[in-house]
Image (spheres, rainbow, N blue to C red):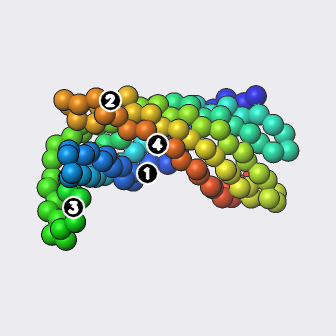
């Protein structure tokens, strides 16, 4: 088994939260810059298997509320949510060698937010991701 620290690309994350009150619904959109920092455990010889686990940090770029109604004139409004969302990420995956310098990866990840979305509420983000990657190795 090989252990490594794996910084999985900085990414732009679009999250949303639906809230209902009576007959009306409201969608809150969140736009984050996400940085997962993962520990990776590798095993397997022909097909590489790996497990990723670690924290993720998401920095809020923008937040907006959009009412969902039958009326076509929807008004967007901005709001203040928690500026930093942090949580835990865990995933399992496969690294499939294609040729000497190429590989394909397939990974499933769970992300669990540990901080409330709003300062006064208990709602947290949870997401499930399927990732497909293509790697080019440079062995000189």
Q: Which of marks 4 and 2 is nearer the N terminus?
A: 2
Residue at horizontal 79 percent and vertical 53 percent from the top:
97
Counting labels gives 4
Quarter of the rendering containing residue 126: top left
Q: Distance between the residues labelled 1 and 3?
A: 31 Å
Compared to residue 22, the image places residue 120 above or below, namely: above
* Element class at badge 3: loop
Q: Where is mark 2, residue-wise? A: 115
Q: Earlier in the sequence, mark 2 or mark 1?
A: 1
Label 4 close to label 1 by CB (< 8 Å): no
Which of disc 2 and disc 3 is earlier in sequence?
3
**Residue topped by disc 3:** 69
Q: Nearer the viewer, mark 3 or mark 2?
A: 3
**Residue farthest front in this picture:** 23
Residue 111 visible? The answer is yes
Q: Are marks 3 and 2 in contact (CB under 8 Å)?
A: no
Report the disc number at residue 116: none
Q: Residue 127 carries which label?
A: 4
Circles 3 and 4: CB atoms closer than 8 Å: no
Q: How far apart are marks 3 and 4 (CA)?
A: 26 Å
Which numbered disc flags the more N-terminal residue, 1 or 3?
A: 1
Marks 1 and 3 close (CB-CB < 8 Å): no
Residue picked out by circle 1? 11
Q: Which residue is drawn at 49% across and 48% down?
A: 9
Between circles 4 and 1, the one closer to the viewer is: 4
Please tell me whether mark 2 or mark 1 is closer to you in this view: 2
Q: Where is residue 59 in the image (x, y as percent from the top left)?
A: 31, 42
Give above or below for 140 relative to 122. below
Label 2 vs label 1: CA separation?
Answer: 19 Å
């Amino acid at each position: 088994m090989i252990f490594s620290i794996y910084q999985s690309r900085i990414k732009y994350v679009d999250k949303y939260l639906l809230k209902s009150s009576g007959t009306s619904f409201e969608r809150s959109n969140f736009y984050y810059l996400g940085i997962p920092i993962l520990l990776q455990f590798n095993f397997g010889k022909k097909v590489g298997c790996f497990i990723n686990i670690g924290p993720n940090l998401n920095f809020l770029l923008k937040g907006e509320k959009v009412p969902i109604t039958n009326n076509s004139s929807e008004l967007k409004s901005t709001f203040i949510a928690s500026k930093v969302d942090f949580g835990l990420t865990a995933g399992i995956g496969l690294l499939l060698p294609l040729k000497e310098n190429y590989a394909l990866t397939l990974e499933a990840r769970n992300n669990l937010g540990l901080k409330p979305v709003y300062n006064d509420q208990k709602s947290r983000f949870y997401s499930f991701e399927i990732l497909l990657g293509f790697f080019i190795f440079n062995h000189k």
